[in-house]
Amino acid sequence: MSELEVRTYGGEARPRVGFFTDTSLCIGCKACEVACKEWNRVPESPQGFTGNSYDNSIDLGANRWRHVAFVEQRKELGVDGVAAGGLVEAASLESLVTDTGLQTYQDGEGLRWLMASDVCKHCTHAACLEVCPTGALFRTEFGTVVVQEDVCNGCGYCIPACPFGVLDQREGDGRAWKCTLCYDRLKDDKEPACAQACPTDSIQFGELEELRGRADRRLEQLAEAGLEGAQLYLADSSDGVGGAGAFFLLLDDPEVYGLPPDPVDTTRDVGESWAAVGVAAAGLAAALIGSVLLGGRR
Amino acid sequence: MGSNMAEQHPVGFQWVVEAKERGATVMHVDPRYTRTSAVADLHVPLRPGSDIAFLGGVINYILSNDRQFTEYVRHYTNARVIIKDEFKDPEELDGFFSGWVPEDGVYNVSTWGYAGTSGELPAGKREQTGDVSGDQAHGAHGMRLEHGEPPEEDWSLEHPNCVFQLLKRHFARYTPEMVEQVCGVPREKLLQVAEILCRNSGRERTSAICYAVGWTQHTHGVQNIRAASIVQLLLGNIGRPGGGILALRGHANIQGSTDIPTLYDILPGYIPMPHPDAGDDLDEFVERNGPDTGAWGDLKSYAVSLLKAWWGDAATPENQFAFPYLPRIDGDHSHYQMMLRMLDGRTRGFVVIGQNPAVGSANAGLQRRALANLEWLVVRDTNEIETAAFWYDSPEIEAGETSPEQIGTEVFFLPAAAHTEKDGTFTNTQRLLQWHFKAVEPPRDCRSDLWFTYHLGRRVRARLAGSTEERDRPLLDLTWDYPTQGPQDEPDAETVMQEVNGRHADGSFVSRYQELRDDGSTTCGSWIHAGIYRDGENQSARKKPGGEQSWIAPEWGWAWPSNRRILYNRASADPEGRPWSERKKYVWWDASERRWASLGDDPDFVPDRPPDYEPPEDAKAMDAISGSSPFILHPDGLGWLYAPTGLVDGPLPTHYEPHESPVPNLLYAQRSVPTRQTFPRPENPYNPSDVQPGADVFPFVLATYRLTEHHTAGGMSRTVPYLAELQPELFCEVSPALAAERGLEHGGWATIVTTRTAIEARVMVTDRVQPLKVADRLVHQVGVPYHWGRKGLVKGDSANDLLPLVLDLNVHISEFKTATCDIVAGRRPRGPALSAFVEEYRRRAGVVPGEPVREDRAGRAEGGAAG
Amino acid sequence: MTGFLRQLRGDPLGLGNSARSRRSAELVPRTKTADRVVQSICPYCAVGCGQKVYVKDERVVQIEGDPDSPISRGRLCPKGAASEAYVNSPVREHEVKYRRPYGTRWESLKLETAIDMIADRFLRTRAETWEDVNEDGKPLRRTLGVAVLGGATLDSEENYLMKKFFSAAGAVSIENQARI
């Protein structure tokens, strides 16, 4: 789908870009959250103390376009009764270093603190885009999905359409806001603010094809290192959203991070029927009228 | 160890992550499971304050298994040096080194020296006392070192009194079993850490140790780092690429503010402040403070050049180059003492510039009471911090203890310029000076601290013009003519840097500290910075992109001294000057050129001095250092496994319990560091410890720390909306077991109590904090970040209100990192009820504020000789 | 409704080019419209990350990592990334505030007046607390009556002037965060 849309730019079209967020490198510093807010002048969104590990920003929303999840996996730390044999363990650890050039990523004793920076997925089949009646949401020449603040009228159709719950209306403004993948920066060949800030390169920006190759290699490495739960998320173009422009390497199942395990483009069938131009025009016109009325009532 | 690098230095941590990607093993030995632990290969939780026991275990492992890098140890360290017969180890004296003077509470250090010297300290030098100032100051500067002629040494390392054998005996009891009992670390974890360190050291490999205030903020902070330096010297990890002990500092210029100090006991470049005993005699000052040998052998040149920079033409050979103009120190005049003097009404005026003691210093309640006893206070900051607001908004006012009407302090708040509003350098944690360019003018009344100091100085000097008072001469003769620029008359920072760099008599810039002279023909504001303006160019402002140079990046900024990126890098070559291995090649002797060569760094040695150089008799300064002695700042050119001088609490690190600790010292009868500084006064009561009566009232270990989202006392983060919202409230971290024991509810409130006060915090119950099995019992920890206060966008109680003042005598740093406490569910009492609540705790614990600290050995009989 | 017309001419779904507004088409990042960009260093911890400070109309409009820095390679932590919000903080103070002894409120004061008053107080306290010699008649030439604290967030040049001036004035209790 996105290819089709990008093609409309003709010579202006650019290779599709995105994020590969490798959570095995994330240190939970939240530089991405802050750099995003700084660049995009996203309003503050204080939630108070949540008690949810070190996460006090809760979720993505109109006023938070990057969000770092913290997952404490709670198992007892062995204090007692560990058998002798530390040297053997050390030796095996070293052989791991020599053999694979990579270690297991978390302490092997059961306590694990997962951190992952979430963001708009910039789906290949983007339901938000497809339901938007005003053309505020559109596919850019970079293949990303952006809400145009000068067009959005706050109808809110996109919000339930997103299978990830990314989109939200801003209070006091009414319009929908989300990650633009720093559309303005891309136009000047600058990487998005979050990716540039990320201290450990957990957030990697680049051409999607190249990122996918990198992710495959990374997953192989981690598998060799014995990290069994590691998996790619939204990297597969045959999944329910046709793969995403922003995909992830997770160390556990998506649900653990609060991500839907099998997201689908809610409008996929509808979208295809819209390929008939006449029907589409009529449908959009109807939707537009509806949204204006809805907007007026809000 | 003692560092939470991923959280506190995230961007520096990228290099750790990258090293790990390339095969390095990352081990995190730290009380809590933090964001650093989460990405480490191994996390080893240990009880706060037990680091020396753990490192002692590592040292013992190295020595008992013969795993040291023997050639390095034999040639480059003082392992071979024989120590006086009179020296006695804590193993022999149950926790004391020889020379303990109980009535003074200090050591006479005369038995700690190298063999072959007399029992006396160097001529004219008083024996060491608790007064560690001036010529007695800590080892940051050159210290005198006497040794026999020739030095008594045993290159086989077998003499029973050689350092190597002393080390073996001293650490023999730091067995894995003992470490397990003291630290709460399972023995195999210790063995794993030790083994990995050993395997990753030697000719082909190096290991680095990173630390931060988790090591310094103890009554034995200096010895924590000493213990690490023993590990690294034994394994041959100093002066080599990928090795070292890396101090991770927490402020943009905390390194620079030590190098060019705003510290009472040193002058720029670690030259000690003079003591009255040296009188007005510059030569005696040099003789007392500078060794004849090594890089400090030229102390007189450094000192005279500094005096010439400050007093210009008024500094002449006839007046000792104005040496008498310097004020004298004769005791501990450090931060905590200045606050105590305020309480006593002896310090009446106070200028605070970019610091927030009302939140950030230990026993913050004492700090605020001190501020309230001043005549006048100047606070310069970008925001109205708690230190400026203490007179109308403080816990003491909330508790009804005082009110604005009762506080006579006159307060000036002056808004400061931000880093984007001024030119200047920050010195980062690896000694790298980086220039930051001014982007905009400071708004309205905001001014740089350069502006404040310069214009205050101008006004003060103008008021004194014509004065005949002797005390005003140093001000009137001071070189104080910096050009100003712009609409605000901002002094030119680059001119200041030129003065720091120094000049020859002809006005040309000095390019290396070796060019400085003691005859008044050179000026230099800080000898270690000589060369920063080399060739008339601001070397710190060099910004050649990293991608366009080698990994050493010598053309980005400038590192002192002489743009040297790895100190003591002569040690990266073997005694003959060849790289230890191709893999770890860095500096080597180029025999054909007859010079030291390197991959791109400045060799830390006399450039053309061959490895086989043997100093002639009576050689001085660098000429007295042999060609195979890399540690040129030491008078003998050796790395000190054993510190014969410079420390006041012992030549070897020894495990002592923190001042407040729930358990006895399992190693020695002496519980805590004998020389620690305590201040038994009403504002600074201590919790009873160990088996002292009342200790059970405060049964838990309290640890304070920081979070990524905030910066120290919060003045630069609680004021920033995007940071404030990420960590909006003070919380405490407790284990599920402690939560169950005390009925603490996750997300609810808890009150944490010490004899100082009580604070409240939201509760975070987490497995990341675990009880540790110590001395056969379970010790619970309460973790509290300290960033909050009463101003800013997010507010909360300050963890430092809970802590006592108790200092490491070497450096006068307080023990922030561990104390004891109690924790109960619910919010703390308000108003006068708070004092009553704390008073009840004191009563139960039998604590009378102001009473002397109880004897360490008290109750020892009941405690049993567990060691 | 112009979108519909465009869509009928080559963007059948109206989700790409034809939906792009003029604003979107002409978007330029403020790093590009800045009047100047200045190389700086992060003011928070001691890693010393490089920063680029973008200025528009004499106001800092963006601070981000400097990719040229071999220390930080363009990256910043949350604090460094928030530097613009720090220098433009809503609670930043821009004017001198004065509280007289036993006063109950802040008063305003001219900067020049404040510096003059501080100079007077400094000299007065210095004179009142001056110590010339100790009990043994050895030189002290100092005052412990005035203390100075701070420096770890300041520039080295600022620390240098502070140490120089206050030492020349005889103050010895000059300390900073490094003690903590």
Image (tube, helix red, strand yellow):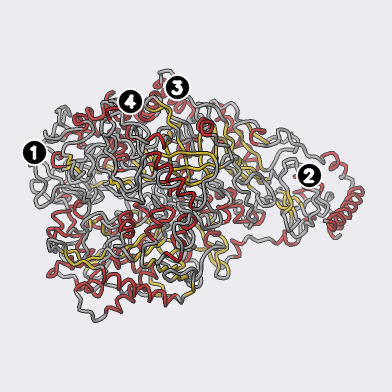
Residue B849 seen in this snapshot: yes
Q: Which mark is residue A80?
A: 3
Based on the displayed image, in which of its 4 quarters is residue A239 positioned? top right
Q: Are marks 4 and 2 in contact (CB under 8 Å)?
A: no
Q: Nearer the viewer, mark 3 or mark 2?
A: 3
User: Subunit of mark 4?
Assistant: B
Residue at 52%, 64% in the rendered image: C92
* Image-based side of A272 in relation to B451, left or right: right
Residue at mark 2: A160
Q: Which residue is mark 4?
A: B178
Total label count?
4
What chain letter is assigned to the residue under label 2? A
For label 3, count other residues whose C-alpha is less than 10 Å away and answer few (under 14), some (14-19) or many (20+): few
Q: Residue at x 21, y 66 (%)?
A: C131
Same chain for the residues under marks 3 and 2 in the image: yes
Cα separation, mark 1 vs mark 2, equals 85 Å
- In 3D space, how far apart are the residues under numbered discs 3 and 4 (Cα atoms)? 15 Å
Are both tags, 1 and 3, on one chain? no
Distance in Å between CA atoms under marks 1 and 4:
36 Å
Residue toward you, B624 or B768: B768
Q: Residue at x 55, y 52 (%)?
A: B723
Q: Secondary structure at mark 3?
A: loop
User: Label 2 neighbourhood size at 10 Å, few (<14), some (14-19), many (20+)?
Assistant: some
Of discs 4 and 2, which sits in the foreground? Answer: 4
